[in-house]
């Protein structure tokens, strides 16, 4: 595996801290008094939205723990496939370009233009998470694409 991009630790830890604060706030909203049967009844019937919120926060926290585990090699390739984290992958020969796009909330991200007959780009990584400059990551991806026999787009030098 060839590592293309690593993630900075600070934003990942910050997202984990936000999850812990939200989890603490939601757990504080539950009523724990009385015997365990009353507490369970209260959770299920009186505060079901709080319990669902706790489940959602735990899911997001588990995601950020997974990102933390893979932060040293978040974007990588094996000569045939580009991998992001532990879930997403694309064949290198299908990648046409890597672009910077500002999302709906104003957060910039590197996105892949993939040749699969769809008009949708695939998010690679948010820029604020990257340890390296976005140009370095873009050039590394495009170099890997050229080596794999994909579209040879010349790397940009800034």
Image (cartoon, rainbow, N blue to C red):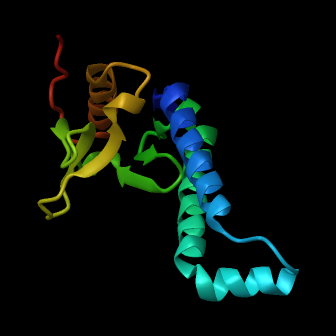
Asked where in the image residue 4 lies, by quadrant, the reply is top left
Q: Position of residue 41 (x, y in %)?
A: 72, 88
In the rendered image of this protein, does residue 43 appear above or below residue 91? below
Look at 55% across and 59% down and name the residue there. Answer: 57
Residue sitting at the far top: 158
Q: Quadrant of residue 92?
A: top left
Q: Position of residue 77 (x, y in %)?
A: 45, 39
Q: Residue furthest right?
A: 35
Q: Is residue 118 above or below residue 45?
A: above
23 vs 113, left or right, is right
Q: Residue at x 57, y 30 (%)?
A: 72
- Residue 75, image x and y in percent? 45, 37
Q: Residue at x 53, y 68 (%)?
A: 53
Left or right, residue 45 beside residue 10: right
> Residue visible at 57% across and 62% down?
59
Compare residues 5 and 109 and report the one nearer the observer.
109
128 or 117: nearer the viewer: 128
Q: Is residue 69 above or below residue 42?
A: above
**Quarter of the N terminus within the rendering:** top right
Q: Residue furthest front?
A: 34
- Of residues 18 and 72, the one drawn nearer to the viewer in this rendering: 18
The answer to whether one can see residue 46 in this image is yes
Q: In this orientation, does residue 1 appear?
A: no
Q: How many marks?
A: 0
Provide residue 140's location: percent of width, then percent of height. Answer: 34, 26
- Quarter of the rendering occupied by the C terminus: top left
């Amino acid at each position: 595996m060839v590592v293309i991009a690593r993630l900075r630790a600070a934003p990942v830890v910050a997202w984990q801290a936000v999850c812990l604060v939200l989890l603490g706030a939601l757990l504080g909203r539950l009523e724990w008094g009385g015997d365990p049967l009353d507490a369970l009844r209260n959770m299920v019937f009186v505060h079901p939205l709080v319990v669902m919120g706790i489940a959602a926060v735990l899911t997001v926290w588990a995601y950020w723990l997974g990102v933390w585990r893979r932060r040293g090699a978040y974007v990588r390739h094996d000569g045939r496939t580009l991998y992001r984290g532990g879930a997403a992958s694309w064949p290198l020969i299908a990648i046409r370009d890597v672009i910077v796009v500002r999302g709906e909330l104003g957060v910039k991200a590197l996105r892949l233009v993939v040749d699969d007959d769809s008009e949708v780009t695939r998010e690679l990584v948010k820029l604020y998470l990257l340890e390296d400059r976005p140009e370095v990551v873009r050039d590394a991806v495009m170099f890997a694409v050229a080596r794999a026999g994909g579209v040879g787009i010349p790397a940009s030098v800034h």
